[in-house]
Image: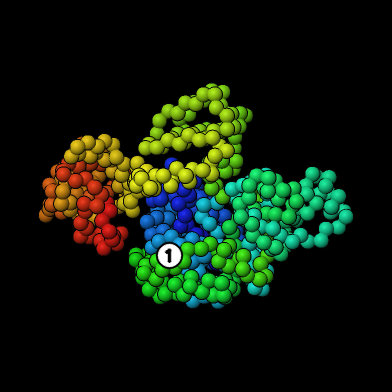
Amino acid sequence: MLLPIILSGGTGSRLWPLSRELYPKQLHCLNGEETLLQQTVNRLRGLENILPPLIVCNTEHRFMVAEQLRQIGIDDPSIYLEPVGRNTAPATAIAALVARCSADDPVLLVMPADHEIKDKDTFHTAITTARPAAEQGSLVTFGVTPNRPETGYGYIKFTPEHQSPRQRRRLTNHGLPITAPQAHTIHSVDSFVEKPDKPTAEAYLQSGDYLWNSGIFMFRASRYLQELEKSQPSILNCCRRALAESSIDLDFIRIGENAFKQCPSDSIDYAVMEKASDVVVVPLDAGWSDIGSWDALWSAGKQDQQGNQLRGDVVVSNVKNSYVASESRLVAALGLDNHIIVETPDAVLVANKTHAQEVKNIVAQLKQAGREELVVHKRVYRPWGSYQGVDQGERFQVKRLIVNPGAKLSLQLHHKRAEHWVVVCGTAQVTVGDETFALKPDQSTYIPIGTKHQLENTGNEPLHIIEVQSGSYLGEDDIVRFEDQYGRVDEPPVA
């Protein structure tokens, strides 16, 4: 059987300000009506002899991941929660150890949750091509056929299969390198190569001996663990201990925090693939993109006649080859070429497209300054719904809460602030102290400092609340939980 492993622990920092630590790119709809995570799962539909996917994600994202899976019909997913990020090698080790315990050494198909693949049928064909080699013990990676000298990707140098004079003439007539890899074939891997500079990338493209490293892998669980034990035994030992210390939390499995924090951080490429024998690559020409930067998102999407992608409330004049996106207000651009403009309610990015990879430098500055714009959006998601700041001043703060149907906030109190709730639309059931009552639109209630309270949406539509906070301290960590249907009573205080 084939067991898909979907790795959803990344933060997508090069897509800031859209992608942030608590709401990363894989949970966004970047190129359609489904999020990248949902696309990754749905891409598997139609494959034969396949098990339900196993998801490894950050503990902070767990409720959003579960909800997005529920929306596409997966009501009982296997979701393993990383207490901290340790890159792809440990995450895959956890999945392989789980697979060895619960199944008869399945073949693992390891995929990031934040990539785009436009041609599902070609992707399935590549998987079918790779599967026999993985079943027989090879470590398989998928290499994307390059169409430009890309400096933002790692490369795989492969050993080409023999090509007949007829094949060489056909490739030459189509303007392709004579060693261009053929679809539905398997090649030996010569080496993995770091991201090159522009001249080197151009040489790679011309030679035809290189593929982009897609970060997608296939191998038996036992084979991966065997190689990991040879090359990085400390990772495997830490993951074994972390899995032994794991616990069940609602519908999630929490990986043991103490052991996993001690685990070295490393990628599958560095920890295993570059050191192992019998590593092969299957060419993949299926419209792949890692959507890893704003220029990659522009390249992967559909441009208008001026080469622009425009999203949201945008007006442009004499703008070419640019990506302009607005979330909350009108954005106007004039006389630009090859630019990126991304507006969110609390941050705006303006960059030349040739510097798209350098967004990480801005992210590093924000991290050093401790800016919350790196971590959260203006709209903050919670398992019960979301809230968004409307206004803030000395000793007061106004928020808009949206509570999903049937959802309920924890029974809680605050030591330093009082709250005033006004129902805008929907029906609320409110507990204040010892009293429980219903509130309808235009009705309100007051919660004094130190009073236990709870809010529940008893209706079938989203409940909209305006919350006015007042007090000496308005931080989200001023909260004491007594009951919570999402199992957060013992977690560090966050609303």
Most foreground residue, 272 or 412: 272
The x and y percentages for residue 423 are 23, 40
Quarter of image, res 238: bottom left
- Residue under numbered circle 1: 80
Answer yes or no: is residue 133 visible: yes
The x and y percentages for residue 285 are 68, 51
The x and y percentages for residue 237 are 46, 75
Q: Secondary structure at mark 1?
A: strand
Callout 1 amino acid: Tyr
Quarter of image, res 421: top left
Mark 1: few/some/many CA within 10 Å (<14, 14-19, 20+): many
- Above or below: residue 372 compared with residue 343: below
Position of residue 160 in the picture relative to residue 152 (left or right): right
Please name the residue shown 49% across and 53% down the image. Answer: 37
Position of residue 104 in the picture relative to residue 411 (left or right): right
Most foreground residue, 133 or 475: 475
Most foreground residue, 479 or 405: 479
Position of residue 127 in the picture relative to residue 111 (left or right): right
Figure label count = 1
Quarter of image, res 317: top right
Q: Quadrant for the N terminus, please.
A: bottom right
- Above or below: residue 113 compared with residue 94: above
Please name the residue shown 19% across and 46% down the image. Answer: 473
Please name the residue shown 38% across and 63% down the image. Answer: 83
Answer yes or no: is residue 128 visible: no
- Above or below: residue 365 compared with residue 408: above
Q: Residue furthest right?
A: 165
The x and y percentages for residue 210 are 70, 54
Colour scheme shown: rainbow
Please name the residue shown 37% across and 67% down the image. Answer: 257
